[in-house]
Image (cartoon, rainbow, N blue to C red):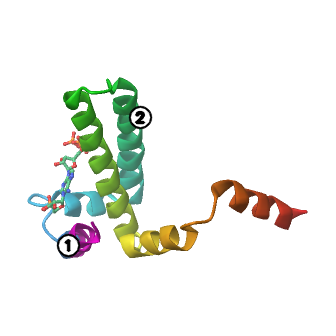
Amino acid sequence: MSDILDRLDAALADRRHADSESSYVASLHHKGLNKILEKVGEEAVETVLAAKDVDSGDSATQQALIAETADLWFHSLVMLSHLGLDHRQVLDELARRFGVSGHDEKAARQHGQD
Ligand SMILES: N=c1c2ncn([C@@H]3O[C@H](COP(=O)(O)OP(=O)(O)OP(=O)(O)O)[C@@H](O)[C@H]3O)c2ncn1[C@@H]1O[C@H](COP(=O)(O)O)[C@@H](O)[C@H]1O
């Protein structure tokens, strides 16, 4: 999986300063962080709506959710790229969390606040 993420991040870096007319990625960077965040929010909402529409066993609604999730991931990667970050830091964070129960992590956080 991370092969396509590596390739996509390389493409995002390459397209960052391209011509906005020919590159959607360049046009997002050109419009700035607020536009990119607006797209992330929009794609998050569309993902939630597509998930609510999934009919178990119905491949069309499942495919619609997959497409919306891909849009969300893509725009999230553009956001990271705009801020000088990339997917590797996110994967590292997921790796760091791997095997740590969310309940245990939350309890440790709350304990630390006492
Ligand atoms: N993976 C993607 C990708 N996924 C989704 N999109 C675009 O994201 C947009 C989705 O947003 P919407 O559905 O809201 O479309 P829209 O209505 O046209 O958008 P707005 O006008 O509302 O901003 C569409 O234009 C999609 O084509 C993507 N655009 C580019 N990529 C990758 O980025 C690379 C570089 O793209 P360019 O910069 O366009 O060359 C491509 O080769 C791909 O690998």
Residue in the image at 33% along x and 27% along y: 54
Work out whether residue 32 or residue 109 is closer to the camera in this orientation and state it: 109
Q: What is the magenta segment's predominant secondary structure?
A: helix
CA separation in Å, label 1 and label 2: 27 Å
At a point 24% along the width and 42% down the height, the residue shown is: 67
- From the viewer's perspective, is 34 left or right of 20? right
User: From the image, which quarter does the N terminus lie in?
Assistant: bottom left
Reply yes or no: does residue 5 show up in magenta: yes
Residue interval drawn in magenta: 1-13
Residue bearing the label numbered 1: 7
Image: 66 above or below 18: above
Q: Residue 51: say if magenta.
A: no
Image quadrant in which the C terminus is located: bottom right
41 w.r.t. 14: above or below: above
Which numbered disc covers residue 48? 2
Q: Say which element carries label 2.
A: helix
The residue at 21%/67% (across/down) is 4
Asked if residue 16 can be seen in this view, the reply is yes
Residue 50: x percent and y percent?
Answer: 34, 31
Asked if disc 1 is less than 8 Å from ligand 1, the answer is yes
* Element carrying mark 1: helix
Farthest left residue?
A: 22
Pointer 1 and pointer 2: residues touching (CB < 8 Å)?
Answer: no
Residue 6: image location, x then y, percent = 25, 74
Q: Residue at x 19, y 29 (%)?
A: 60
Can residue 86 be spotted in the picture? no
Q: Picture coordinates of residue 90 (x, y %)?
A: 45, 69
